[in-house]
Amino acid sequence: MKAIEFRDVSFSYKKGGFAISHLNFSVEEGEFVAVLGHNGSGKSTLARLCNGLLTPKAGKIFVYGEEVTDKNLFDVRKKVGIAFQNPDNQAVASVVEDDVAFGAENVGLPREEIGRRIAFALGAVGMESYRTATIARLSGGQKQRVAIAGVLALKPNVMILDESTAMLDPRGRREIVDVVKKLNKEEGIAVVLITHFMDEALLADRAIVLNRGEIVMTGDPASIFERHEELLTYNLDLPRIGKICKQLQAGGMAVPDTLDPEELAEAIARCVSSRNG
Amino acid sequence: MRIVAERLNYTYNANSPFAVHALNNVSLTIEEGEFFGIIGHTGSGKSTFVQHLNGLLRLPESKKRKRRKSKKNAPHSTILKVGDFDLTDKKTDFRALRKAVGMVFQYPEYQLFAETVEEDVAFGLKNFSEKKLTKEETAQAVREALEEVGLDYNAVKDKSPFDLSGGQKRRAAIAGVIVTKPEVLVLDEPAAGLDPLGKKELMELLHKLHREWCKTVVIVSHDMDEIAENCTRAAVFSEGRAVECLPPRELFKKTDELLSLGLDVPLTAKIARALKERGIEIDCDFTVDGFVSAVLAKGGKP
Amino acid sequence: MKDVSFGQYYPVRSFVHRADPRLKILFLIAFITAIFIAKNFYGLAVCAFVLLLAILFSRVPFLKVLRAVRGVLFLVLFTAVLNLLFRTGEKTYWDGPAVYWSWKIFSVTQEGIVESLFLVVRLILLVVCSSLLTYTTTPVSLTDGIESLLTPLKWIRFPVHELALIMSIALRFIPILMDETERVKNAQMARGADFESGNPVRRVKAVVPILIPLLLSAFRRADELGDAMDARCYSGGKKRTKYKKLRLGWRDLIVFLVGAAMVTGVVLLRIYLGWPL
């Protein structure tokens, strides 16, 4: 079943020019999609369209087969959650559990259920032991995990991460990437990971490249990274490991295009020993 | 200007239940002409350290200086010198120091404030100049700074800085710091939040600045690949201490130590480590180019 | 990580810390009432004794509590001196002239001395008790307490929920904006801005480079927070449930009994003992 479907969707901001134009795109239930694009390519607009924070100027958006309208925003947002970029700008409360409870309170769940949801959500992001901690004292990665937990408390079917790793340090990024993988594999939640870190896209089932509000490439991440020259024209680049593979190949070493350092080391070792042996 | 720090200590909220010992006996020397990297987690003390370099954070000792004058040359005293500026001395001209040491903070575009780009870039210039500058002098300096960072003076000078694109804003903000031609330029996470191309262009800009305007460049970064590609030497901060200070070629041989500190290593070092496990030693500077040619020397076409 | 603390919460575990914030707020109100009902020093002595007990049981160092007085000392003394000079009266409390000194409208009388002393004690007690509340109660739980106490006002359509949310968000963002102010200030100082010298006009002008970035950032944060709240199904106070419930315990019973006993005692002392010695 299609969790999210865009049919010929266009959107523009007041300043003019289409942020998104004639976009057709869908996310299957349980799928992990990475959306890549340079700054200003329309990635964030796409995210905000998915759960009705923005309304398309033309075209239709469906969530689980139902068209998104003003009337069913509540239901749409229960199904499609978003975590945003800035770890500091998403929490309404100062204490972790109060903030995680916020969404569940908004939809009017009973108290006991909210308690269970908090436990579930904090467990899913590995923050159980921080239930009564003060958010201001957490690290960026932890804050961002709390923000994700706040969305999870609504038990969404789709989780959108709108550059949620962009402002984090490598440790924080790793934390979020691990959480996202787990949500997708263990909880079966569909994930739309919007990012400009190329290596994060490697985890996805499918990657989409946006450029000027249009989808210009789509396919599994490996196949996208094979089209190196094309990526460059969209102001994107290979993950560093891809670059190393290309350069080694150009230098006459028979290594495959791989995105795994161990695999590359193995291939290099084979080449070295075959030359020496 | 050579930067010398010895036995530097700093505590936030001293004498309160919230006291944080941010720097613990940090000793570090940055030579003139280096492109120096500072690595560490959030809270490792790296930002605290760089804020000392232009006197935004002052040494608590400098206040007690008078009482301790007799102990001036005691072996345990702190030393912090930037060129001829002695930062432990209260009488140091901190304005002159700040002019000589430019500081670009994280997300510098968020400090833009003036109505036009020209005015914003000129802000530091006016603050630091001893005499009143003529319009022409100001315009000339602003033009040079904007062109140095790759912006078209005539096209942007009268624009509101808030109407620029993200990447342009950051360049304009950097122009606002280098407009006084500081000898040392310190940048905290200069490439944070930029997309791959933006990052690449920014690092190119920093090298250009290093060649043409600022003798010494110090960058604080989380990105080990960035450090490996760009820096002459790098210091590793952990829990308020400077635990290592080496050129990338030696630093990233200590892969295990870095990983045990919870830090990353460049991708090249990761592959080199995996190769070492397979009995192949790669000696390189851990840049992508250096790594590739070292590998090719071992196993490319004969 | 710089100024992680704001307000003056003193983090230890104690009887007073763990008492319900509502009871503590009510106790403060009772205390203020009591010191204004008190017409003689016996009444104030009762209040002072109760306050002393409270301080002992709060485990907040005595000096720390007194430091709160230092902040308002000037104001207290100023009020007392004015009171002393303007007070006229013939009452005598000890042997000696009723009026010690007078000049035009100013005079020093026995009544004035006693009244002023009384005033000083009252104000100091007031300040100490209020700061004890803030020493022992986090801003968050203070907000919870206020919200809970205001709940009955919902009947007259007073926006209790909105008010509580505003307070909660404010508390959440105060440390963030403080940090940000520091950062922007540092950045502008690095560009040679001088906030400490010059005439008042210059100083006000010098604030502009801090104020504008700060305002812009606050708006940007508000925007993002709004999106994050919308994405978590926020739609005002209607149909909303509340996870956090304050529960009363034995400590609160004791706080209540002590408060009630104090007020009763002071009232009795006022009725049966004269004014003011």
Image (tube, coloured by chain):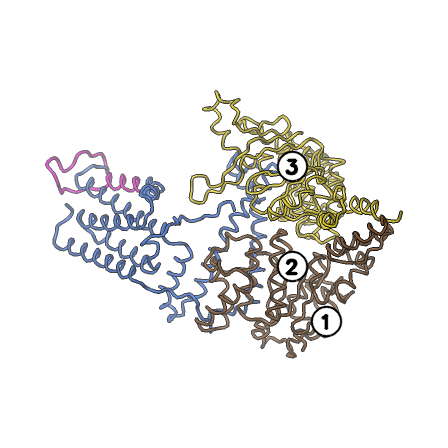
Residue B279 visible within the image: yes
Disc 1 element: strand
In which chain is the residue bearing label 1?
A
Q: Mark 2 points at which residue?
A: A163
Residue B233 placement (x, y as % from top left): 69, 37
Is disc 1 surrounded by few (<14), some (14 to 19) or many (20+) residues within 10 Å? Answer: some
Place residue A184 in its image quadrant.
bottom right
Q: Do the residues labelled 1 and 2 touch (CB within 8 Å)?
A: no
The answer to whether B268 appears left or right of A185 in the picture is: right
Mark 1 vs mark 2: which is more N-terminal? 1
Residue C83 placement (x, y as % from top left): 25, 42
Q: Name the residue under label 1.
A: A25
Place residue C100 in its image quadrant.
top left
Where, quadrant-wise, is the C terminus of chain C in this rendering? top left
Q: Name the residue under label 3.
A: B245
Q: What's drawn in magenta, residue-wise?
A: C76-105
Instruction: Please tell me whether residue C243 is drawn above or below residue B239 in the rendered image.
Output: below
